[in-house]
Amino acid sequence: MSEVLLSVEGVRKYFPVGGGWFAAREHVRAVDGVDLVIAPGETLGLVGESGCGKSTLGRVILRLIEADAGRIVFEGRDLRELGRTEMRNARRHAQIIFQDPYASLNPRMTIGEAIGEGPRVHGLLEGEALDARVAELLETVGLRPDHAGRYPHEFSGGQRQRVGIARALALEPSLIIADEPVSSLDVSIQAQILNLLLDLQERFGIAYLFISHDLRVVHHLCDRVAVMYLGRIVELAPSAELYDQTQHPYTEALLSAVPVPEPGGGRERIVLKGDVPSPIHPPSGCPFHPRCPRAEDRCSREEPALREVGAGHLSACHLAPF
Amino acid sequence: MIRYTAARLLQAIPVLLVVATVTFALLRLLPGGPFDREKALPPVILANIEARYHLDEPVARQYARYLAGLVRGDFGPSYKYPGRDVADILRDSFPVSIQLGAAALVLAMLLGVGAGLAAGMRAGTLQDRAIIGLTLLGISVPSFVLGAALVLGVALRFGWPPAGLWESPAYALLPALTLAAFPTAYIAQLTRTSVIEVAGRDFVRTARAKGVSEARVRWVHVLRNALLAVVTYFGPLLAMLLTGSFVVEQIFAIPGMGRFFVTAVTNRDYPLVMGVTLVYAALIVLSNLAVDLVYGWLDPRIRLAGDES
């Protein structure tokens, strides 16, 4: 991979929990040393079950949550070292689409105002030029330009998510972090929004970090996929390869849970034992070993590193390649 | 909008009629009459007085007579202040109460919202805690204590502002402050909670992600959404300030309506009680209407049906 748009190196985010008179303050290890690289125009999928830290990672990258450690190099600059004003300027090029299209729009702003606010506060456009841009954006995402004066409550969920996308596009970003952009929508609407995202990528060359827990969606959309478990990346591979030549038992289990639309077809279901361990006290060694069907002795002692097990295929399993 | 306002004003008529009826009935149910004295009046004199005020008629007749008067804008005579009309008394005292209430309202809104923002925007800091402490004080200290303290500690010690009566704007200072203390503290807490709540909402995060400056996030995205809670309180507050000034008017010897309200009840001055109650009821109806109109203006989701704009 020659060009790099975003490079995340050793990023960590621990949230403090508890800490009373008698209890010591502990930490949830939401993101525990993550490395990622995204090339311009690429789509990197980030999957994992609820609570694995994928949304936190997305927000940490944009500094909506401050990381505790690590480097976030975007377009050649470490975002964590930027001052307020520089960071605000950097936000022009990296935008985010949120999961909840209802809550992420200000109820007292027309959608035209919400979409136009980005270009306006960055001093890019104003007056008629801004109105024209808003109309153009609405058209781009498949909404009627004359709806700019309406308020968010007048739209359906899918329409609001389109507004959210138009809002993110307004600043012509080179990277969009899509944080489960379709998981609160109907399946039929999901497909529309996903196709819209693909279409926009083709037209504007935007790179996506696509956060999801839906493996089918990720497979359909992404060039490469990273699998996250307990705040760490356990496997990262080109999309097709991840599905065909899985090199981590956790990914195997996830894939076996994907419903297959053929009776009798599909893989053998791997049912994991137990619950996700507490991210406050992650297990020793490999964090997955208590639930892993392949676990060996050393898995509970030695922490596996994320290493290359095939061309561009990384796995954090002692036993890989299988 | 105009149609809506007119409709709401029409709806006020039955409300006021119910208020008048209930008040009338309750007054007649109270034991004692307007002309009971420690030393009973001679029966002949009492009968004469009662005949003069039509109190010897059946109650239903008296009620009809009163309503007929109201329609003509006649609130009847005061029993306690012979020679003065109730309308007359209201004309003198109502503006005073309104001025006092309005002064307290402005004070409470400015100080309360200001303090609430100062606390809520910096939640958890020393500044926040200091303001919370002050609001607790404002809510807990009753107005007769605060009023007396202000008279003693400020007016009598420094000779300014004046400790009583109602002659120039300076006379409104201490009573308005006393009256505003509770609502100020309440509004401050309301604003603080609401600011903190809104600041945690998703769309505020969206605004930050757009690269909107922190100042704009606060003043445009947070403030406008947070103020709705305060507007909700505006109606009850208005009513409370206008009707609740009795204690304050007493402490500062202010010739307002609150004073007449209570003395009129103890004196069984039927027409005066009726008059004051109706004025208060009308005020509350109007303030509720005002709040609903402000609501629609602040929150596009509550825009009235049929008001396509």
Image (cartoon, rainbow, N blue to C red):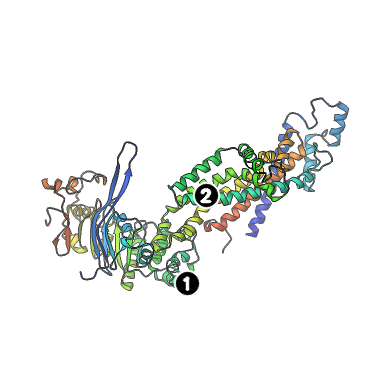
Residue B306 picture quarter:
bottom right
On the image, the x and y values in percent for residue A20 come to 34, 39
Q: Is residue A144 visible?
A: yes
Quarter in which the N terminus of chain A is drawn? bottom left
Left or right of residue B163, residue A194 in this image: left
On the image, the x and y values in percent for residue B139 come to 55, 40
Residue type at mark 1 is: Glu
Q: Is residue B304 visible?
A: no
Marks 2 and 1 close (CB-CB < 8 Å): no
- The residue lying at 21 percent from left, 71 percent from top is A2
- The residue lying at 23 percent from left, 46 percent from top is A282
Check the residue under mark 1 and report the chain it is in.
Answer: A
| Residue matched to label 2 | B115
For discs 2 and 1, the disc positioned in front in the rendered view: 2
Secondary structure found at label 1: loop
On the image, the x and y values in percent for residue B203 come to 43, 57
Residue type at mark 2 is: Ala
Check the residue under mark 2 and report the chain it is in.
Answer: B
Left or right of residue A176, residue A294 in this image: left
| Residue matched to label 1 | A126
- The residue lying at 49 percent from left, 69 percent from top is A146
Residue A314 picture quarter:
bottom left
Q: Is residue A221 above or below residue B143?
A: below
Q: From the viewer's side, name the closer residue of B68 and B126.
A: B126
